[in-house]
Every structure is written in structure tokens, then in C-alpha cells.
Amino acid sequence: MGWFKRLKDGIQTATRNKKDTPEGLWYQCKSCKQTSTMKELKENHFKCPFCNYHVRIGSYDYFDLIYDGNYKILFDEYQSKDFLEFKDLKPYTERLASARKKNDVTDAITVATGKVNRKPLTIAAMDFKFIGGSMGSVVGERIARAIDYAIENRTPFMIISKSGGARMMESAFSLMQMAKTSAKLTQLAKAKLPYFSFLTDPTTGGVTASFAMLGDVNFAEPKALIGFAGPRVIKETIKRDLPEGFQTSEFLLDHGFLDFIVDRSEMKERIADLLYFFDTKD
Amino acid sequence: MVFLDFEQPLEKLYEQLNKIQQVGQEGELDVEPMIKELETKIKNKRKEIYGNLSGWQKVQLSRHPERPYTLYYIEQMCRKFVELHGDRYYKDDKAIVGGLGSLDGQSVMIIGHQKGVNTKMRQYRNFGMANPEGYRKALRLMKMAERFSIPVVCLIDTPGAYPGLEAEERGQAEAIARNLFEMAQLKVPIVCVVIGEGASGGAIGIGLGDRVYMMENTWYSVISPESCSSILWRSWDYKEQAAEALKLTADHMHSFGIIDGIIKEPLGGAHSAPEDMAKILKRHIKKAIAELQEMSTDELLEARIQKYSSIGVYDEVAPTEEGQ
Ligand SMILES: [Zn+2]
């Protein structure tokens, strides 16, 4: 468990997480193709200064953006193992090793606890770069332990989802994490602690069909891809093109599955507002 | 009879048997000894084939066109059954059926995926792929069962939740997630049995329970072997390898502690003796319900949460000191 400090001048990511955020001096926007400096991008909450495209960022970036200052990383000691001896074109052990080497985060979710405008909040945030943010046993276990921690310490709980879905290399164990995380969330609900589900680009598959859709409050970043089935699979099934804006945050808001969409620059204030409303001790 | 590719040796023997029986009917030739011999051969061949099935072959069996589906089992197991339709919000999904039945005097709410028995009905049942309203109907029936202390039985047999445009609009993910959340705390016993295909979220959407069983020739996985092949091998041609790698059979699932037991099928699979299969299934369900009814509601819910909380394999490494 380590403590991380956000530096005062602008937003500084923790050193261990450098590889999860865009690297280099320049950033070319994936959406509008305009180029900005990395400094401008960071000062703009990792959004394109020209078109407001929300660049995919990692768990530590969110912790830095949301927490007041210090936060504590929890349950990093639980790590994936290749129980099934799974091998496709590559053995799972190799995929795990290369994901660890590339990312500096130890799995597709990282748990932290800290304060947001002086109110406590435990957050589990996913990293897409770690095997597509896929959910295996460790994602489920870290969420389960984060929920136990939130209950013991009476803190609200938030999950920041960013996932392609299941970790196929863990087969049924991966599938069962849907049941495990949902079952654990019932304990949080019984303890009368609020659960916020924050969906970011992309959130699909078994993650959407379990904890991501179960928030007391569900909210998302603008224009995130959110769905159960992937767009390609749906297109192949129905054999016609998908409508413009299908499976975006805006689409989900319109269809009644999100409470609101929040711009990353207002994210912290909005979360702080929720914590204020749900804090019954005041 | 429909023979699968690995059953071809059997098909040949059956052809011979038919010919001999015809000869027997036509002439005065005594074919009785030959028939006896062939029947023994068939029996032995069947034992040989079925004693050594691969993961993929079990997947094939789980999809056998003559395999019994939910409504067949309900009809066989329950003297009385009233089907209950609709989710009360949008529609009646035809891929998930449910209703009140009686298992020798014990009322149960039986819910299950339903596939069609012929081309027309397969369409009508959407090949057992439910839309959100199917999961919401299931939940409505479960909540009703809870109010009246009626145990819930879920029969799982789906190639997956339907990946359609309207399914997304109406919240396929939310419907499945809600079921998991509610089933985790439903105050009555829940017994689940995979009777055919147990594919991914579509299966677990009615698959969280106090006891989960798989029939011998079924599979349960996070993804079908075909889709797994196409994603991880980037080709549709590795379904056999994918089926092995996913370790999706009842034997594997039981050894992992993910399911509570395996329900043996008659030799040749459930479809070869469906009435016997229904009897075996009924016996298992009745036994499980009786055991679960011994527990108090608190014990039941505690055990259920504990059961799911403990599923997962991972390493625990020494925490490292890092940061400032
Ligand atoms: Zn841009």
C-alpha cells in the first residue's frame, strides 16, 4: 500500500502510472486530429482543447483528478494467475507478464481510498490498457474487498468502469465475477452506503451487465461507448447499419439508463455534490 | 434419429440393424440372433463413444436438435403447471418461459430458457436468446415467488442474451445486472440447472442460486467456443481448441467448485431417453429444495453471498512499499 501525492502545480500523475496516459510532448486528438501540447491536455483534464474529446486515461489519473490530495492504494497484493493454463495464440501467462510490464498497474482495476472535498470515498477504477480492462478473478476480488473496506470504514463507494468485458482466459471464473460483484453490492446497499457507477469509454459486456448498471446513481463521461453486446456483433446479428450515436452515453441517457453525463472538468465537483447529498451525518 | 459427426460409427450400425429387420419382416429367415448381436455392438459402441467425449463434442450434444428443453421437463416433472406471461413493462419474451408448477405437492416457480422444437418454433423462441423483457419477466416471477415463500427453479439453456439493437435500447445489460443483484438476496431457495447451453451473461442472468448443477453433456462459459475462437485465434476454425481451453464442461466446472454437482444423463445423452432424464432431474431438484428448506432465511442468504464471494483464483503477493 502506498501513498500518492498530487502536486500543487497542475495535475501530476503518480510516476508509476506514466505508461497509462499519453506519452511525449505532443498529443494529436483521435477525434479532431488537432495537435496540442501534453501540458495543455493535462491542464484541460485530459480533454482535447479543441473538440473536448475525453482522452482515455488510467486509474491513477482519475484518482489524481478526484481526490483532494493524498490517497491510499488498497488490495494491490491480489494478482491474477493462470489457473486454467489457458493458451490461445499466446499463453495467458505471457499476456499477463506483458500487461504488467507495459502498464505499471497490477491488474485491470485499482482500488484507492481518500477524500473528495473532505468527504471520504473509496474508488475502484479500471484500466483499459491492462488486457482490455477485462474482468477476471482479481477484478472481482478487489471490488469485493473494496466493498468490505467501504462498509467497515463507512465510506461511500464508486466504480469507474472502463472495460471490454470478460477476461476470456479465465473462462467461467470470469463469468462468475458478475455474480460475485453484484452479490457484494447487495451488502453495501444493506449497509445503507451509496454506490456510484461512473461509466467511461468503453464499458461493455459483463462489466456493463453487472456492477456498472447497478449504481444508486449511474453517470458517464460524454460520448463513451456503453453497451452489452459490442457494436460489431450487433451489426452482424441484425445485418444492417447501426444508427448514429448508438450505444453512446447520450443514447443511454436518452433511454433511461444514466442519471447524467458529466464533463471531466466538472467531475470532481459533481461527485462531491453527490457525497454531500448522501452524507446523512451532517 | 439425428446423428452427430462423432456418432457416425453408430449410424452405420443402426443402418445395418434396419436392413436386417427388413429382411426379417420379408422372409422366413431367422434374423433374431443377428439383431441381438448388432444391438450388443451398438450398446458397446455407444459406451465407447460416450465414455470419452471431448469438450467440443459435449457442446455439440448440448445443442442436439432432439435434446429436451425447459417446457418438456416441466411437462414431465409437474402434474400441474400454469405458465405466467409477460414482464408487465413491455412484452412477453418467448425465449424465457416461467410459471407455477407442482413437484409432487411442492409448489415451485420454474423459469427457463426455451428453444424451439422445429424451424418455425426456433424463430418464435428466438433460438433461446432472450431480450431484456425475458430477464424482467423472470425477475417478476421470482419476486412473486419470494412473497409467497415458493422456491425458485431456473433451467438454463441459451446460446447467449440476444445481441440486438432493441435489446440494447431497452437495457439488456441493466436487465441482467438487476437479476444478479436481486437473485443474490431473494429470500427463497434458488436451484439452477444448466440443461443445455450455458453461454455467458445470458445464462447467468437467471443462473445465480443456492445450488447450481449442470447436466453431464452441457457447457457453461463466459463465451461460446466459436466466438472465443474468432476473437482469440482470429478465425472461426479453432472452436475445438477453444472448447478445450475454456474448460467449459460439467467435470471441469465441478472440479473448480463453481457448480455444486453434475446430473448424470442416460447413455447417449438426454435426448436418447428424455423421460428418464426428466425423472433424474426432478429427483435432484426435489432433493436440493428439501435441503435448502432446512435452512433459515438468514442462513440461506448468508451462505449464498459467501458462496459467490469465494469464487475466484488469484495470487496474493507481498504488498510493496512505494510512492512518497
Ligand atoms: Zn480534438
Image (tube, coloured by chain):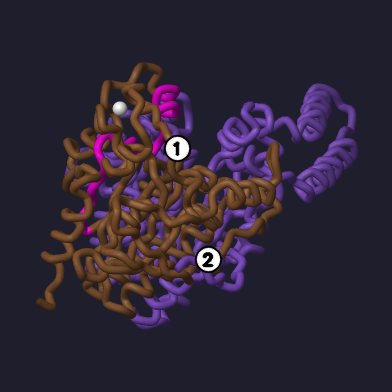
Chain colours: A brown, B purple
Residue B101 in which image quadrant: bottom left
Looking at the picture, tell me which residue is in the foreground, B37 or A182: A182
Quarter placement of the N terminus of chain B: top right
Does residue B232 appear left or right of residue A242 in this picture?
right
Above or below, B249 relative to B211: above
For label 1, the SS is: loop
Residue at image point 15% right, 67% down: A278
Q: Which residues are magenta?
A: A216-237
Q: Is residue B76 visible from the viewing direction of this image?
A: no
Could you say which is closer to the camera, residue A166 or residue A8? A8
Does the magenta run of residues contain B227?
no
Rendered position, A64 above or below B48 = below
Residue wearing tag 2? B311
- Check if residue A230 falls in the magenta segment: yes
- The chain under label 2 reads B
Q: Residue at x 40, y 81 (%)?
A: B295
Q: Which chain letter goes with mark 1?
A: B
Q: Residues within 10 Å of mark 2 (few under 14, many from 20)?
A: many
* Three-letter amino acid code of the residue under disc 1: Lys
Name the residue rendered at 37%, 64% in the picture. A5
Q: Which mark is residue B115?
A: 1
- Kindly identify the amino acid type of the residue bearing the numbered disc 2: Ile
The answer to whether residue B295 shows anywhere in this view is: yes
Q: Position of residue B36 (x, y in %)?
A: 85, 42
Dot 2 falls on a residue whose secondary structure is: loop
In the figure, is residue A168 to the left or right of A217? right
- N-terminal of the pair, mark 2 or mark 1, is 1
In the rendered image, residue A271, in percent from the top left (x then y), is placed at 20, 57
Q: Nearer the viewer, residue A225 or A127?
A: A127
Ligand 1 quadrant assignment: top left
B132 or A278: nearer the eye? A278
* A211 up-or-down from B113: above or below: below
